[in-house]
């Protein structure tokens, strides 16, 4: 279908790649590309940051970036994400109202100029809140508003006015999509009617994230993700120290960056395992599949996740997963089928599960094959886009 013949959706997100090869997670970009194949052309509205053009196309997707403050103060988005940035610099709360106003103005201008029928907001606040305001402002347009909660927005400890705005936004949206059944339960606990909530996770590019060529040697343990408290990497280092007592030649590669990196490097030194741990830092998305393809297993010690899509990426690469048994992971990692689950914060249990994979090639192969099949059927971008097309068009699947 030609671009002229496609329906148009305004996509608002605070996390969107800034440039080709950016380390910012690209799931919003990938969804836009998949929706294009479903007949929906996306116009992405994302925040501006230093060095970025206000209008560009990224891998075929139109993106407009709105300014919300003087350049030195445009620090709300990117990096570790909006919530992490605010926690690191509390004064950014003062910038948030200007962000919302600028987003509202920029989105309104787009709606005036374009024949847009659907607004898809990623994260409830601030994008979702602005989206439901747009529907009221453009009531004659009969906009359909889809709000997607990715985890941090529902898990955040919000009280007072912020909590009321969160609840109001979810109730006012035409549909609230969440990325896991655990998040559906959280939303219902906040008063959102069950019939308004749809479980619709983001996807995995199963062409890029794929098993290595036959005969590729695998070795070691890999972790991929932010180095933040909720990701539980401190527990992984404790567990790896225990593992090395029985498998002294093993290596752990930690891919990612975040506020705990320096602390984790000190912890590795104190545990006497620094020589067996590589901190690779943040890597471009194009590099990530190779880490999964070369590792014997992927360890995911998160204490809190909306879904833990990185585990699906590992599974797509045929890399067995060992994860903490938390609600946001359970719909993805099926115990003893598509991965191994252990009690959260239990370093001994995590070490024991990793040893099982490392020492039992048959178990590793069985879990790897099942994981790949599970991702192909449930998390490929074609499957995800079909679900979101139904939501855009007012159907439920």
Image (spheres, grey):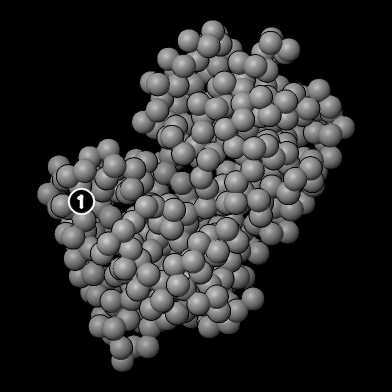
List x then y, in percent, for residue 328: 58, 51
Front in this rendered view, residue 115 or 14: 14
Q: Is residue 207 above or below residue 1?
A: above
Q: Residues within 10 Å of mark 1 (few under 14, many from 20)?
A: some
The residue singled out by tag 1 in the image is 93
Q: Residue at x 42, y 81 (%)?
A: 144
Q: Is residue 281 left or right of residue 98?
A: right
Q: Residue at x 52, y 52 (%)?
A: 306
Quadrant holding the N terminus: bottom right
Q: Residue at x 23, y 74 (%)?
A: 109
Residue 222 occupies quadrant: top right
User: Would you say residue 77 is visible in this rendering?
Assistant: yes
Residue 153 lies, with reference to residue 147, above or below; the image says: above
The answer to whether 68 appears left or right of 337 in the picture is: left
Q: Dividing the picture into quarters, in which one does residue 358 lie? A: top right
Judged left or right of residue 391, residue 64 is left
Q: Residue 30, percent across and down?
A: 51, 56
Q: Position of residue 202 (x, y in %)?
A: 55, 57
Q: How many marks?
A: 1
Quadrant (top left, top right, bottom left, bottom right) of the C terminus: bottom right
Return the x and y of residue 185 as percentages of the image width and height.
Answer: 55, 64
Helix, strand or loop at label 1? It is: helix
What residue appears at the point 21 percent right and 43 percent down from the top-left corner? Answer: 90
């Amino acid at each position: 279908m030609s671009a002229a013949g496609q329906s148009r959706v305004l996509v608002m997100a605070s996390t969107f790649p800034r440039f080709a090869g950016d380390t910012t997670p690209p799931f919003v970009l990938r969804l836009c590309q998949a929706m294009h194949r479903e007949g929906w052309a996306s116009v992405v509205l994302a925040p501006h940051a230093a060095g970025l053009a206000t209008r560009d196309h990224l891998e075929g997707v139109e993106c407009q970036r709105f300014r919300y403050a003087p350049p030195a103060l445009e620090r709300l988005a990117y990096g570790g994400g909006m919530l992490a940035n605010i926690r690191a610099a509390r004064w950014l709360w003062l910038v948030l109202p200007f962000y919302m106003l600028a987003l509202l103005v920029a989105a309104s201008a787009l709606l005036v100029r374009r024949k847009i029928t659907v607004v898809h907001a990623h994260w409830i606040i601030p994008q979702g809140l602005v989206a439901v305001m747009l529907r009221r402002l453009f009531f004659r347009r009969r906009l359909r508003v889809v709000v997607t909660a990715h985890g941090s927005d529902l898990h955040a400890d919000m009280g007072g006015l912020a909590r009321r705005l969160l609840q109001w936004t979810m109730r006012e949206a035409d549909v609230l999509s969440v990325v896991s059944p655990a998040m559906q339960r959280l939303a219902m606990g906040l008063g959102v009617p069950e019939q308004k909530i749809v479980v619709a996770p983001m996807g995995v590019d199963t062409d890029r994230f794929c098993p290595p060529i036959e005969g590729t040697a695998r070795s070691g343990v890999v972790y991929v993700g932010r180095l933040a408290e909720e990701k539980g990497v401190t527990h992984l280092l404790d567990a790896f120290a225990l593992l090395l007592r029985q498998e002294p030649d093993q290596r752990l590669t930690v891919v990612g960056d975040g506020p705990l990196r320096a602390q984790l490097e000190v912890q590795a030194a104190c545990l006497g395992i620094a020589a067996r741990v590589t901190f690779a830092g943040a890597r471009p998305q194009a590099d990530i599949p190779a880490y999964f393809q070369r590792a014997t297993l992927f360890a995911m010690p998160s204490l809190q996740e909306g879904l833990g899509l990185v585990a699906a990426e590992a599974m797509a690469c045929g890399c067995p997963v060992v994860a903490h048994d938390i609600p946001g992971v359970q719909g993805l990692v099926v115990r003893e089928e598509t991965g191994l689950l252990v009690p959260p914060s239990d370093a001994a249990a995590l070490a024991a599960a990793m040893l099982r994979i490392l020492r039992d090639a048959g178990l590793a192969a069985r879990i790897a094959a099942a994981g790949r099949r599970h991702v192909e059927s449930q998390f490929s971008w074609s499957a995800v886009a079909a679900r979101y097309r139904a939501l855009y068009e007012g159907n439920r699947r």
